[in-house]
Amino acid sequence: MGLIYALAALGISLIWNASGLFNFSQGDLLTIGGYIMLTVFSYWALPYPLAFAVTVVVLGILGYLLSKGYFYPMFNQNFHPQIILIGTVALSVFIRNGVLLVWGPHAQCYTNPFGSKPIEILGLNIMPHYIWNIVIVAALVAALQVFLRRTVIGIAMRAVAQKPVAASLMGVKVEQMISMTFLLATGLAAISGILIAPIIPLIPEMGGLIAIKAFAAVLIGGLGSFAGALAGGAIVGIIEVLFATLVVSTYKDVFIFIVLIVFLLVRPGGIFKADISEKV
């Protein structure tokens, strides 16, 4: 669960680095990913790898179009950052109601592609999809690091995140790189939705609940830090399970926010504190 939160947190950090935008609709994009996977895998009966790829591509294109048609016009016209922030909340409400309209209010799920028989490891019974989630997320993070550090597009995206004006003067197309960042972030949201669907039944409000924990992971790990997003996601997942197991499951979400408040008071920049701070 912590790795899934970390994936969502990575998407939030990517968009923050590229545009300075705290995207409150990221969790609802995750929900769309889960429902598209439900449609192409369960209803259309596509093979799981193909359905996985189709879902990621569709969400990536959606993120690219949202950047071009929704967010960038506001950036280009110098809207106040708080107005753009409210725009992400409005987009979240729109997506949630769109999901409700298309797929309905009832919880849905699809057949677990990894099987439902637990695997015994060191005396513990672990469901196969948990193991696969770890493998997929680890491979994805490694590929993301290679992409950002070894490819021309990845290096250009990092340049825009650090110094957009300087990147523009060096010939980098800032608008295009921001759109590519949105594409990548929504692709990560799609993968999060796909991986969490065998664990939590799909409901229109699912993404909002996960996004809250992803935002907590971002702030605990360090806003804008990829390593912080991973560490924060792992911490939130571990805290959630330990508190639910050792204390009481009813208030596990409350305890996560108590930990977040402690971090904000003691180390407001997070574990991997950024060089600059912004008011969110």
Image (cartoon, helix red, strand yellow):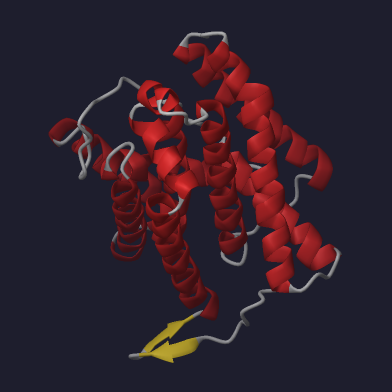
Task: Give the residue drawn at x 73%, y 68%.
Answer: 50
Q: x, y percentage for residue 224? A: 33, 37
Q: Is 174 situated left or right of 228 in this image?
A: right
Q: Nearer the viewer, residue 1 or 67?
A: 67
218 versus 53 height, above or below: above
Q: x, y percentage for residue 275? A: 20, 31
277 versus 32 height, above or below: above
8 versus 94 height, above or below: below
Q: Quadrant of the C terminus?
A: top left
Q: Quadrant of the N terminus?
A: bottom left
Q: Is 217 situated left or right of 259 in this image?
A: right
- Outermost residue toward the left in this view: 266
Task: Give the residue drawn at x 68%, y 53%.
Answer: 57
Task: Give the residue drawn at x 57%, y 25%.
Answer: 89
Q: Nearer the viewer, residue 1 or 139?
A: 139
- Outermost residue toward the right in this view: 44
- Outermost residue toward the front in this view: 170
Task: Give the residue drawn at x 44%, y 32%.
Answer: 18
Q: Is residue 67 visible to the viewer in this orientation of the structure? A: yes
Q: Is 216 situated left or right of 63 in this image?
A: left
Q: x, y percentage for residue 183? A: 59, 42
Instruction: Write down the quadrant of residue 195 in the picture.
Output: bottom right
Count of numbered circles on the image = 0
Q: Is residue 32 visible to the viewer in this orientation of the structure? A: no
Q: x, y percentage for residue 4? A: 47, 57
Q: Is 79 situated left or right of 3 in this image?
A: right
